[in-house]
Image (cartoon, grey):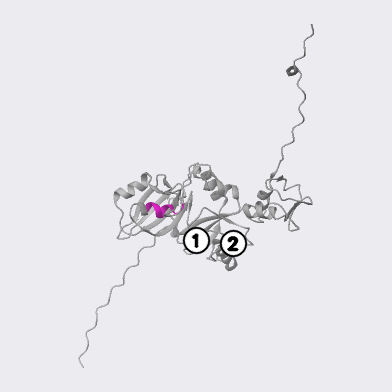
Amino acid sequence: MTTKPDPRSNPKPSPAADPQPTGDRLQKILAQAGIASRRKAEELILEGRVQVNGTTITTLGTRHDAARDHIRVDGKLLHGPEPHRYFMLNKPRGYVTTLDDPQNRPTVAKLLAEATQKKVTGVHGKLPRLYPVGRLDYLSEGLLLMTNDGELANSLSKAAAGVEKTYLVKVSGVPPASGLEQIRNGIMIDRGRLNEVRSGRRDRVITAPAKVELVRGGDNPWYEVTLIEGRNRQLRKMFEEIGHHVEKIRRIGYGALRLDVPPGEFRELTTGEVTALGRAAQGKKVVPKAKLPEFAQLKSPAKKKPSLPRRPRSPR
């Protein structure tokens, strides 16, 4: 009696698996070369303006080797990625934290270009295409990081990193101690834009605990507030929840960095400062300098000049 061979005992050889593509995504290569942001680079690819080794690429996600492949945009050959550079900008009020604005408001990109032309900080040479790390709203001012290192920027912006950001906040009226304690422990705020309603209800979220310390008292006090997240208009929403309007916001700290340049000016970070940012992005503890620089402090209120006694009028 003959038995049929078990097909499982002699399986057919499987065809060789296709080798996995290596290299970086094309849009990432274009962004690293300073051609455009990654989103804009995707548009260039879809428009058929990018060629790799003579072939026009119109599909997103293809991988290539920037060191070996000949990549052209509008016929111009790429010369490899730009070196990463990192800057601290003191953003004034009245600028938007974008590279271009549909409403034609002043942008931080325009501010950087103007500052470079004036050479107010002594920065040499032409700056690469820089992108802001995080945001400061139109009316807020202070420390803003600018870089062409997309990976570090993304790492710093992730909520899981918990990078500390410190602000000076001027509030209208004196908040009660119970309200400040709510902010310290975490307070419920709107997730999206102010008064935004989604699916018939307001989308609410509780904030992470924050540090709040009084810096200057008075009818409209100043507080130093440290956050480990960066939700949309978070500071304004937190104080609105306890019944107080925020009049001014100035960011004075980011990780171990402290604001040390005048309004409207910027400087390049040192190697040590970039290393400290990398550590902060990994969730590691970093310690800023103990002494606050001038531009991270509140200015002393102007003293009123004593009025001179009036001279008696001489009789006529």
Which of the pair 178/217 is nearer the observer? Answer: 178
Q: Position of residue 314 (x, y in %)?
A: 21, 89
Q: Secondary structure at mark 2?
A: loop
Q: Is residue 99 left or right of residue 213?
A: right
Q: Position of residue 162 (x, y in %)?
A: 48, 44
The image's mark for residue 91 is 1
Is residue 279 part of the magenta span, yes or no? no
Quadrant in the picture for the C terminus: bottom left
Q: Residue at x 32, y 49 (%)?
A: 179
* Range covered by the magenta-colored residues: 232-239
Q: Looking at the image, which residue sits at the far left?
A: 315
Q: Is residue 282 above or below residue 35?
A: above
Q: Residue at x 34, y 59 (%)?
A: 172
The image's mark for residue 170 is none
Residue flagged by tag 1: what amino acid is it? Lys
Q: Secondary structure at mark 1?
A: strand
Q: Position of residue 176 (x, y in %)?
A: 29, 52
The image's mark for residue 123 is 2
Q: How far is mark 2 from mark 1, CA to CA?
A: 17 Å
Residue 16 quadrant: top right
| Comes first in the chain, label 2 or label 1 | 1
> How many numbered marks, from 0 up?
2
**Residue 235 in sight:** yes
Q: Main secondary structure of the magenta part?
A: helix
Residue flagged by tag 2: what amino acid is it? Val
